[in-house]
Image (spheres, rainbow, N blue to C red):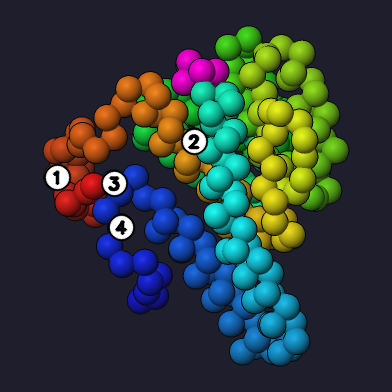
């Protein structure tokens, strides 16, 4: 058993537990690499410093996400559908967006890998579609930006979550000097905040539990909790 060291999470829609689990796995990877001799002490220290930079960036990411939501609140709250697109290590981010948006905002939401999206799902796009592109360094970045430019011809509601500085008003810049492999630890945080705020703006009462018989009916491991 690995203790993720966050205590009891009283939010029914897991947030800090998700981020803490990612961090633990990253730390475990560094530990295992050092123990197995795949990296030396200097490389281990460098990787730990990178993780420290990511963690220290979290308060700023939260603040910037609050500003971003305030600016685009009306558009986001009116959305009938959300899609996020990413590639490489960002695939985990878009799949968590899919889960978090579906369970809180409660409209159709999907996270689609870049190449998979270009092999069919792009036919679905229409003028009401809200789309998020996850812009991180990597070999497929050029194709991501080409796809983003293409979709902007068909919907006005295109947003970007970008690792690094950016001044485009529809881009939420995640200001942290980390690589694409550590980026998922912090790139998911804007989606967690947006999920909550969009849900509240739509009038969803998140503390009010629904489907309370679900766990028993399907013999789920999830147990009823004393949620905030």
Per the model, the C-alpha gap separating discs 1 and 3 is 17 Å
Residue 77 tag number: none
Q: As displayed, is residue 31 above or below residue 90?
A: below
Can you say which quadrant of the picture contains the N terminus? Answer: bottom left
Residue beneath label 2, please? 194
Q: Residues within 10 Å of mark 1 (few under 14, many from 20)?
A: few
Q: What is the magenta range?
A: 74-78
Sequence order check, earlier mark of 1 and 2: 2
Depth check, mark 1 against mark 3: the one in front is 3
Pick the front one: 65 or 44:
65
Q: Residues within 10 Å of mark 3 (few under 14, many from 20)?
A: some
- The image shows residue 32 at horizontal and vertical percentages of 59, 82
Left-right relation of 140 to 11:
right
Element type where label 3 sits in the image: loop
Asked if marks 4 and 1 touch (Cβ < 8 Å), the reply is no
Depth check, mark 1 against mark 2: the one in front is 2
Residue beneath label 4, please? 9
Per the model, the C-alpha gap separating discs 4 and 3 is 8 Å
Per the model, the C-alpha gap separating discs 2 and 3 is 16 Å
Pick the front one: 200 or 123:
200
Residue 76 included in the magenta stretch of the image:
yes
Q: As displayed, is residue 117 above or below residue 127?
A: below
Residue beneath label 1, please? 216
Asked if marks 2 and 3 touch (Cβ < 8 Å), the reply is no
- The image shows residue 94 at horizontal and vertical percentages of 57, 41
Sequence order check, earlier mark of 2 and 4: 4
Residue beneath label 3, please? 12
Residue drawn 62% across the image and 26% down it = 131
């Amino acid at each position: 058993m690995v203790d993720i060291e966050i205590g009891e999470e009283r939010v029914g829609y897991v947030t800090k537990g998700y981020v803490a689990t990612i961090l633990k796995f990253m730390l475990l990877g560094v530990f295992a690499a050092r123990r197995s001799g795949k990296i030396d002490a200097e490389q281990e220290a460098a990787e730990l410093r990178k993780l420290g930079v990511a963690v220290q960036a979290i308060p700023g990411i939260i603040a910037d996400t609050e500003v971003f939501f305030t600016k685009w609140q009306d558009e986001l709250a009116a959305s009938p559908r959300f899609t996020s697109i990413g590639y490489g290590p960002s695939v985990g981010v878009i799949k968590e967006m899919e889960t978090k948006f579906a369970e809180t905002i409660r409209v159709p939401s999907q996270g689609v890998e870049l190449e998979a999206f270009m092999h069919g799902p792009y036919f679905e796009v229409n003028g009401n579609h809200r789309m998020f592109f996850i812009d991180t360094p990597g070999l497929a970045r050029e194709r991501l930006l080409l796809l983003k430019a293409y979709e902007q011809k068909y919907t006005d509601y295109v947003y970007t979550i970008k690792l690094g500085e950016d001044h485009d008003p529809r881009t939420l810049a995640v200001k942290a000097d980390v690589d694409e492999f550590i980026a998922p630890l912090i790139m998911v945080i804007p989606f967690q905040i947006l999920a909550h705020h969009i849900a509240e703006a739509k009038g969803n009462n998140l503390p009010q539990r629904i489907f309370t018989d679900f766990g028993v009916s399907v013999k789920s491991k999830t147990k009823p909790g004393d949620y905030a």
